[in-house]
Amino acid sequence: MIYELLEKYEADFFVMYADSRDPNFFYATKFRTPDPSFYMIGKDGTELLIVSEMELRRAEKESRVKEIASFIDLGYFEKLNETKNSKKALAMVFTEALKEHRARKILIPNEFPSFLSFYLKDHFEIEVVENPYSDMRAVKSPEEIRYIKEACSAVIDAFEYFLKLLKSERNVNTLRNRVETFLFERGFYAEGTIVSPDLESSNPHSIGSGVIKNHVVFDVFPKSRVTGYFADFTRTVIIEENQDIIEMLNACIEAKNRAIDKIREGVAAKDIHNLVCDILESYGYQTIRNKAKEGFIHSTGHGVGLEVHEKPKISENDEKLKSGMVITIEPGLYYRSKGGVRVEDCVVVRKSGCEVLTKYEDFVRLVG
Amino acid sequence: MIYELLEKYEADFFVMYADSRDPNFFYATKFRTPDPSFYMIGKDGTELLIVSEMELRRAEKESRVKEIASFIDLGYFEKLNETKNSKKALAMVFTEALKEHRARKILIPNEFPSFLSFYLKDHFEIEVVENPYSDMRAVKSPEEIRYIKEACSAVIDAFEYFLKLLKSERNVNTLRNRVETFLFERGFYAEGTIVSPDLESSNPHSIGSGVIKNHVVFDVFPKSRVTGYFADFTRTVIIEENQDIIEMLNACIEAKNRAIDKIREGVAAKDIHNLVCDILESYGYQTIRNKAKEGFIHSTGHGVGLEVHEKPKISENDEKLKSGMVITIEPGLYYRSKGGVRVEDCVVVRKSGCEVLTKYEDFVRLVG
């Protein structure tokens, strides 16, 4: 994909300057570092990673990039002495590295820092592009799918733990903290876990507060502290019978399951989204297709991987699903006078169907 | 500081486009959001925050910025229809907002994304600058100091818990996970906690592995999950007597305490750093001043706040300490043949001295 992009723009190199909190940088280099590093990949297959001196040996051992250099190797200190400006000295180091590789035209991603792009533009022809690694990351390798499965298995355990707690504890903050601690002990970092009760759940972005009375939307999306991969999962738990909520939940469950039945390689994302809208509308609910302010007011889902929200978007999007994509399907319905419901699974797209990674019953009623 | 900078460059606005994971954005707006937002501050005091539609009401309630607009308010959809390019549509929205405020010359921070700076540079005069909020953040308000104190108090509890565990548990990974879980339950997120044993501790960047035999360097730097502020604290625990390690540790303790005695408003950072080097050298250890590869091979300390490492640097740095700065003092000594030691406190600089936020005995021997 990088080579196609370089060819399309008749460019010599694609470059990034980032640390591994940027999932595209981590994906490209497989190097975890808190310090910004420079990565360049050329149309002839050249790859070079430039890191701080302190990280050199670790990068040689851990990164998948074969050729590693340090800022100091490439004359950073001399340039710093000359300019007395650390940013300019860095920009000079990278410019020399690119010139040594005969770069003439360079692609930089949208998020590339301006101190560097403003310097590079005086030395090279520059084109700002959407980061191609964002698209590459959408299709997962078997190893990545294994990592996401581990996270999905942890969320099911966390949900069962939540249900157990719910028998004697109804304070939202206490529940959230106990579930997030449960996950943390097992190696997963969850923040902003949605434990959204009753009428508050009518706002899909509210993480929840107060005490649960009638029902609760539980949406957890932890990240493995080891692999960095996420899972994403939602269930609505009925505590007191409420006909409106139960009907809304049943409609979402049907929409989710029929969408899951339709998923396979080659289906367009928008066809999945439109099926969900069709089903919810058939029950009389309004949807985002009609710019509704209440009802189904968000998209059907999104990719999950090194970010909890990544490509592809399962919405009004022509993109075709590919085998190996991991996506969520998460229909929800939200009414200020009634509250909200949502049900969400994580699935892997396969050639002739999909595999659900978060298997758990859809309709959950608190028992006992 | 913003106004002085605008005046210095004869510029009309300083702008940021970031989400609240960028501490400078959070500090300027006091708005927590995972979605990139646009902030502009003008020489006449104008401030405008532009957020996604979905975040509008929350931004109005939570941000300290008075004037809030949404992308949609400012014609995002019309521009998207026109260009079919979401990044370009955003850039057009921000350009119009700046033009409406009669901007002519604009300052952008080093890290400003290139998709936006490349568009803006065709409409305005642009200057790339060091983000002024990084400097402003160095001096803390009483509220920020309270937040850091809370985190410092949690690290002392976590260290006492660690010492208790250490009586029966010597596996580094188990200890790290239990301490990080202890902190998580109390509302703090710690990652990469250094529990570095024996010879491995000779590498100050190693987080530690295996089983502790003779001594261990414990360095924890959790962030409050509520306030976002960090603490930073290190002690070396002696388990088996080892004269080399004990001498190294005593030298570091003396260096730390004499540095702390010297800290007050107006002292240059480099004078603190040089005092630490002087003391360690007086004991015959080599230091970073002589480009040593072993001995005291890092700087004396750094600011602590919304980032664990922020300004000021306590190293060969002319900057003068100011009342309200929160800094670490952390001399360490590292020898491949002996192992490493470090002792670190977090302090607030005051007019005529400093206040230690991590009060705990310096020389710690495991008892019982």
Image (cartoon, coloured by chain):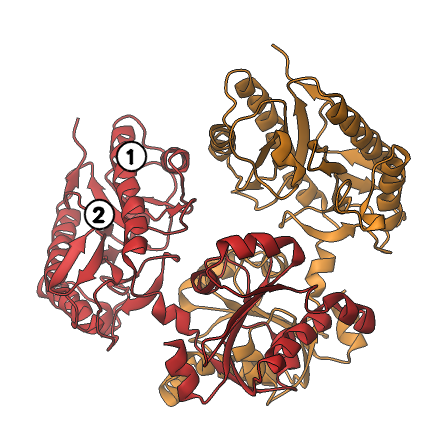
Chain colours: A red, B orange
Q: Nearer the viewer, residue B1 or A348?
A: A348
Seen at 87% across and 35% down, the residue is B284
**Rendered image: mark on residue A162:** 1
Label 2 crowd (10 A; few <14 / some 14-19 / many >=20): many
User: Mark 2, mark 1: which one is toward the viewer?
Assistant: 2
Query: Label 2 is placed on what type of residue?
Result: Thr
Expressed as whole percent of the image width and height from the top left, the position of residue B310 reads 69, 52
Secondary structure beneath dot 2 equals loop
In the displayed structure, A137 sits above or below A10; it is: above
Q: Earlier in the sequence, mark 2 or mark 1?
A: 1
Q: Quadrant of residue B297?
A: top right
Residue denoted by label 2:
A358
Chain of the residue that carries numbered disc 2 in the rendered image: A
Marks 2 and 1, how far apart in space? 15 Å
Seen at 59% across and 21% down, the residue is B163
Query: Label 1 is placed on what type of residue?
Result: Phe
Q: Is residue A120 left or right of residue B331?
A: left
